[in-house]
């Protein structure tokens, strides 16, 4: 991987450029999440380093994803497919700098790169097209190309503390370039296949307000808009509230929705309840619900688009705090429930079938 | 393209902007678990949501595109 050595070099150079006494805060956090069930295992692990120095905060983050899939075609509709074990990786790096340009104003600049599939669904779909058009027992169909997913992003913005400690506004604009695993359609006149668009450009903007609205309540409102190649504009909003119910109880509800013409809608809500058993140990319980209308536009056309989805997630966890160390572990069930696929798209039945996942999360943060 | 104009959303944002004019006791709201922290040890969000729930709002940068080829 090229991005890891480059990012590490930047990290080391940045640290070496300053004297030890100049640093006010260093923070290092590592975390890992896994989700699994009978035929799919997903893992994501990350490490992030923060430093605050002379009014500048910067951080560098590295993320690794692992996808393991026991691929199984839906044989009633897929005569070429065969069982196969898939393993794919994704590596990503992101760096963010936040210099202060006044008592209450910070600039935010961020950039990142990644190499690998963005999610397990794309791994599954890429293998479907590979088996259809580059089958090991048949000549490869003209026009088929192996996917090489990767991408980069840049964003910039401002964070304004418009009322000291009580009111914050943040605005960001971003640009993404993603090389995705493309789809293919057959060309009967040539016997080959035609590749769909593989490079996508996304422009986006977010506006958020964080406010303390009383001695016990902190509120965050986030509004996002994005425009991706060949898609309509997507609007999203999420509201989050942190409520101190007492000295030892905190309730953290959130909710949001997304709209994208012509037909995609999604909404979600959930809450986390935290109870400080002792000064060092807290118990966490959370429940989350998500629902969308799916991405199928024409139910009579062959399409790998996802049908409507509902998910339920329940989590129990513990967080331990010792001096400069914070450790959190959590886990629970995570269910995904898809609507039935249209008849012409049943080849993807095993991708979009209902699944009962197990979910586990662990993280460690240290400040020094 | 119809922009989903939500007057109640704008009104609630205005109320929140003005709410900063109060000066409450900040002891409870300053606790780490009361912050909207980027630290995953205090976050209520989880990484896997970006894979399993494609409509979620992406934060902290430009939004990842969602399966443009498969419709």
Image (tube, helix red, strand yellow):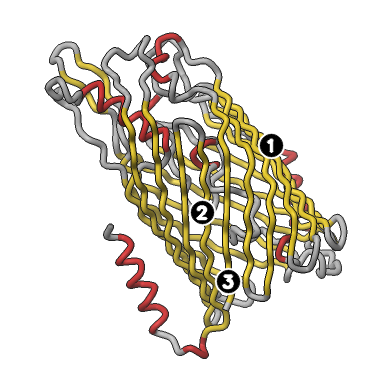
Quadrant the C terminus of chain A occupies: bottom right
Q: Residue A208 placed where, x, y %?
A: 63, 53
Q: Which residue is drawn at 41% across and 48% down?
A: A65
Viewer-proximal residue, A205 or A3?
A3
C-alpha gap between disc 2 and disc 1: 38 Å
In the rendered structure, which disc, 2 or 3, sits on the residue that comes first in sequence?
A: 2
Q: Is residue A89 left or right of residue A167?
A: left
Residue at mark 2 shares a chain with residue at mark 3:
yes
Determine crowd level at label 3: few under 14, some 14-19, many 20+ residues with C-alpha closer than 10 A: some
C-alpha gap between disc 2 and disc 3: 15 Å
Give the mark toward the camera: 1 or 3: 3
Residue B16 visible in the snapshot? yes
* Image: B25 above or below B56: below
Question: Residue tagged by mark 3?
Answer: A366
Q: What element carries label 3?
A: strand
Q: Residue B1 placed where, x, y %?
A: 51, 29
Q: Quadrant of residue A137?
A: top left
Residue at mark 2 shares a chain with residue at mark 1:
no
Question: Residue tagged by mark 2?
Answer: A32
Question: Residue tagged by mark 1?
Answer: B6
* Image: A111 above or below A74: below
Q: Which residue is drawn at 41% across and 43% down?
A: A202
Viewer-proximal residue, A29 or B8?
A29
Determine crowd level at label 2: few under 14, some 14-19, many 20+ residues with C-alpha closer than 10 A: many
* Image: A121 above or below B71: below
């Amino acid at each position: 991987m090229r991005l890891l050595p480059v990012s590490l070099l930047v990290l080391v150079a940045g640290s070496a450029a300053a004297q030890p006494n100049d640093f006010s805060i260093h923070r290092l956090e590592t975390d890992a999440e896994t989700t699994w069930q009978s035929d799919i295992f997903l893992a994501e692990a990350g490490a992030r380093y923060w430093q605050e120095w002379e009014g500048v905060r910067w951080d560098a983050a590295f993320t690794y994803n692992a996808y393991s899939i026991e691929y199984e075609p839906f044989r009633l509709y897929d005569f070429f497919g065969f069982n196969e074990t898939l393993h794919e990786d994704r590596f990503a790096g992101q760096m963010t700098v936040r210099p202060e340009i006044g008592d209450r104003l910070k600039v935010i600049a961020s950039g990142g790169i990644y190499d690998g599939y963005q999610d397990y669904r794309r791994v599954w779909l890429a293998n479907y097209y590979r088996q259809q058009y580059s089958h090991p027992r048949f000549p490869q169909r003209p026009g088929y190309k192996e996917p090489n997913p990767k991408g980069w992003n840049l964003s910039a913005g401002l964070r304004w503390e418009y009322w000291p400690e009580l009111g914050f506004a943040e605005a960001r604009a971003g640009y993404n370039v993603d090389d995705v695993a493309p789809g293919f359609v057959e060309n009967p006149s040539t016997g080959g296949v035609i590749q769909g668009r593989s490079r996508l450009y996304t422009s986006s903007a977010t506006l958020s307000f964080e406010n303390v609205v009383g001695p016990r309540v902190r509120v965050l409102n986030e509004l996002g808009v994005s425009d991706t190649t060949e898609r309509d504009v997507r609007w999203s909003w999420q509201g989050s509230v942190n409520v101190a119910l007492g000295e030892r109880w905190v309730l953290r509800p959130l909710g949001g929705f997304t709209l994208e013409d012509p037909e995609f809608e999604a909404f979600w809500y959930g809450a986390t309840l935290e109870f400080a058993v002792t000064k060092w140990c807290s118990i966490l319980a959370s429940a989350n619900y998500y629902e969308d209308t799916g991405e199928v536009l024409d139910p009579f056309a062959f399409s790998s688009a996802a049908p409507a989805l509902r998910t339920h997630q329940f989590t129990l966890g513990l967080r331990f705090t010792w001096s400069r160390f914070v450790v959190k572990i959590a886990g629970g069930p995570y269910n995904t429930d898809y609507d039935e696929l249209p008849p012409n798209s049943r080849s993807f039945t095993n991708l979009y079938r209902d699944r009962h996942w197990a979910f586990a999360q662990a993280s460690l943060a240290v400040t020094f | 393209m119809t922009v989903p104009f939500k007057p109640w959303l704008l009104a609630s944002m205005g109320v929140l902007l003005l709410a900063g004019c109060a000066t409450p006791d900040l002891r409870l709201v300053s606790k780490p678990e009361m912050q909207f922290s980027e630290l995953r040890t205090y976050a209520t969000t989880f990484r896997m949501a970006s894979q399993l729930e494609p409509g979620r709002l992406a934060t902290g940068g430009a939004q990842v595109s969602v399966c443009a080829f498969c419709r």
